[in-house]
Image (cartoon, grey):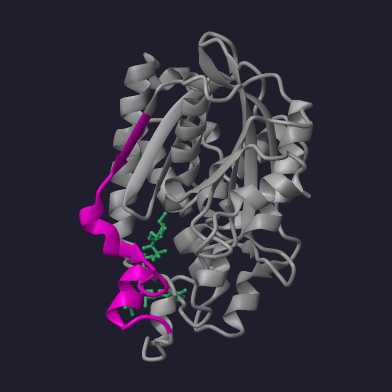
Amino acid sequence: MAAVVTGIGGYLPPSAVTNDDLSRTLDTTDEWIRTRTGIRERRVVSEGLSTGELAVRAGARALSSAGLSGVDALVVATTSPERLCPAVAPEVASRLGLGTIAAFDLTSACSGFLYGLATAAGLIESGTADTVLFVGSEAFTTLVNPADRATAPIFGDGAGAVVLRRGQPDEPGALGPFDLGSDGALADLLAIPAGGSRQRSASGGLGHTSVPTEDWYLRMEGRALYTQAVERMTQSAQTVLKRADWSVADVDWFVGHQANIRIVAAVAEELEVPEERVAVNIDRVGNTLSASVPLLLNDYAARGDLKAGQRVLLSAFGAGLSWGSTVLVWPEISAEPVD
Ligand code: COA
């Protein structure tokens, strides 16, 4: 038995922020952002759009792609939850008309899509669910300091979703073996210090007005992360290729987490995947964390570049630190452009 991808969908908030827009309030330039990150613009949530709303819209599209109006379980991967409590997944399930199904959130930053896929596949393989809707949804720009030129240009908002169903390991869409890993000793390389139980208990409970504003926002050690990202994604991708008994020459598309064009290119070079088989959309969306990989798959599938029968290598890396990879043969499914 295997978990098989049977539907895909994505959603981007309509509001686009260009590098020139950012350079009006930040000490930065379009040229710096483009050459260092590959990003030209990113989408951001505006009033009325939040992690849950993005998830509902992407989830509805994935269900429609799968031709389903119901599933047995819903998993939402997000590192920009609407609230600390409760998880957003039950509300998303309710708003999608999915009833009282199993629904929960999962947090694994930019590797959230890979961790979530493995978890959703596990629900199917354990016999807990026959069908699962899995959404990566992020309104992470709300957690980034708009005055910090090191982080503000990098992130964008959006959601991507897949529907998984029970099937056979040898059919197109079947998720291959996974490689997942973490290194919590390096947790502080990418972290938001305030807002959780550590800071609340240290500051004597609620009403902690002494917490500096910047502690509510993301802190990032860009250089160290860059090195870790290239190393971990490369190792993880190599591990999963070996487990799947695929060679690099078998890979039609390398679909790597869109953290930075230079990271994606460096991983591809290490793996020896030629440039023309590397999927990229960071220029238009930035780093959308757990939505990154499904939005990229949706983009390429919707415009016909990713075709049924092609072999795909997925790999991601993010805060935690955490990383993951898997492989699949792309199935015959419909995909709509996100906008
Ligand atoms: N505009 C202009 N200059 C900027 C800038 C910006 N937006 N951000 C930083 N700089 C400056 C720095 O202050 C520094 O100036 P200095 O040399 O005078 O000190 C200079 O540019 C170089 O900064 P540095 O951080 O060393 O640049 P970099 O080449 O490492 O690129 C990142 C920075 C963030 C693009 C890169 O490190 C990166 O992508 N890291 C990974 C981040 C990531 O992917 N995070 C998510 C993980 S999933």
Picture coordinates of residue 70 (x, y %)? 74, 31
Q: Is residue 334 above or below residue 216?
A: above
Q: Which image quarter: residue 324?
A: top left
Q: Quadrant of ligand 1?
A: bottom left
Q: Is residue 70 visible?
A: yes
* Residue 291 located left or right of residue 205: right
Closest to the observer, 163 or 82: 82
Q: Is residue 236 above or below residue 205?
A: above
Q: Is residue 284 visible?
A: no
Q: Residue at x 36, y 91 (%)?
A: 210
Q: Residue at x 76, y 61 (%)?
A: 14
Q: Which image quarter: residue 60?
A: top right
Picture coordinates of residue 121 (x, y %)? 50, 27
Q: Is residue 201 magenta?
A: yes
Picture coordinates of residue 334 (x, y %)? 76, 28
Q: Which image quarter: residue 245?
A: top left
Q: Residue at x 39, y 17 (%)?
A: 244
Q: Is residue 273 above or below residue 227?
A: above
* Residue 206 located left or right of residue 156: left
Closest to the observer, 10 or 73: 73
Range drawn in magenta: 179-206
Q: Is residue 118 above or below residue 200?
A: above
* Residue 224 located left or right of residue 80: left
Q: Is residue 85 magenta?
A: no
